[in-house]
Image: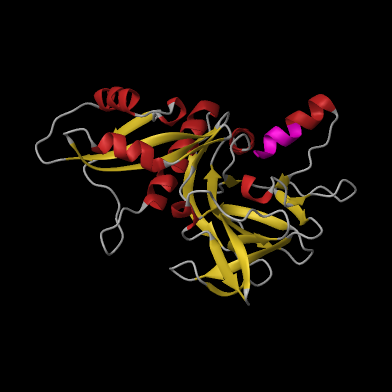
Amino acid sequence: MPVQLFHDFERATGVRILEGYGLTEGACASSLTPYDAPPRIGSIGLRFPYQDMRALILDADNAYVRDAETDEIGVIAIRGPNVFAGYLDPAHNTGIWIERHGERWLNTGDLGRQDADGYFWLTGRRKELIIRGGHNIDPKIIEDALQKHPAVGLVAAVGSPDSYAGELPVAYVQLKPDAVVTEAELIAHAARTIPEKAAVPKRVKISSSLPTTAVGKLFKPALVEREIEETIRAEAKKVGAELASVRVERDPHRGLCAVVAAAAAADALRQALDRYAFKSEVSAAHD
């Protein structure tokens, strides 16, 4: 939840927000910030009694390697009487379980860490869901629809930061050689072929090339970082902040974080970025 939303809500209502965490497969509740504890904005709190919850280090095949150290980012895993037995369709159970010391743990797909006081902090997602106003969108729905257009060669769908919905789906497209199509035409095609209205991309961006890994696989984190940087530059323009530098990096404790230096209106930019869910640090640039 954006930091500014915390402050705005509590100031307007006088009601304190207690962050928690849960997923349907775990009966919707695994951890919560205690009411009588000091505020720790951004933490999902302490695990519930009888809810085993850990950050685990996994290998490339999602197999258990070891428990994460204190403040080391790993995959959040849970086990306990609240965790379901599995999906009705056996095909959906592939890769969701982790064997740890003879016990079966549920791989939540979320990345996070546990601090020295036992509090958990989410830092990102290992799975590629786009979350738009609480609606989970599988990017493959968007990619499959756009891939069927005769002009499209490659496509990657990611979540773009939005101060209201959290994320909005956007798609990056690389056209086939000599193909001609407009971004508006591709959005119209997506609207006709994607069954979920919320999954229709807000924007389609045609690019001459898409970032790939050394083995040729699409590298979506680079596109997510690009969307965050574009959001920062747009907000800076709105508030009249002159940017000295923008860097989106992987912080070892917080995950993806934007580090921004502004030569003017740093405070206004900081307040604007606090409305977004991505983490950011804004400082005043000095000559």
Image quadrant containing the N terminus: top right
Question: Residue at the spot x=68%, y=35% of the render?
Answer: 4
Q: Residue furthest right?
A: 36
Majority secondary structure in the magenta region: helix
Question: Residue at the spot x=54%, y=41% of the render?
Answer: 263
161 is higher (above) or lower (below) than 221: above
Q: Quadrant of residue 121?
A: bottom right
Left or right: 169, with 252 as reference point: left
Q: Quadrant of residue 158?
A: top left
Q: Is residue 193 visible?
A: yes
Mark count:
0
> Does the stretch in magenta take in 152?
no
What's the magenta region?
A: 1-7
How is the structure coloured here? secondary structure
Left or right: 25, with 7 as reference point: left
In this rendered view, identify the residue nearer to me: 282 or 211: 211
Percent coordinates x, y for residue 120 in the rendering: 71, 57
Percent coordinates x, y for residue 108 in the rendering: 58, 55
Question: Residue at the spot x=60%, y=68% of the render?
Answer: 56
In this rendered view, identify the residue nearer to me: 188 or 17: 188
In this rendered view, identify the residue nearer to me: 43 or 274: 43
Percent coordinates x, y for residue 60 in the rendering: 43, 68
Q: Is residue 253 visible?
A: no
Question: Residue at the spot x=9%, y=37% of the render?
Answer: 178
110 is higher (above) or lower (below) than 5: below
In this rendered view, identify the residue nearer to me: 133 or 194: 194
Left or right: 18, with 286 as reference point: right
Percent coordinates x, y for residue 198 in the rendering: 46, 28
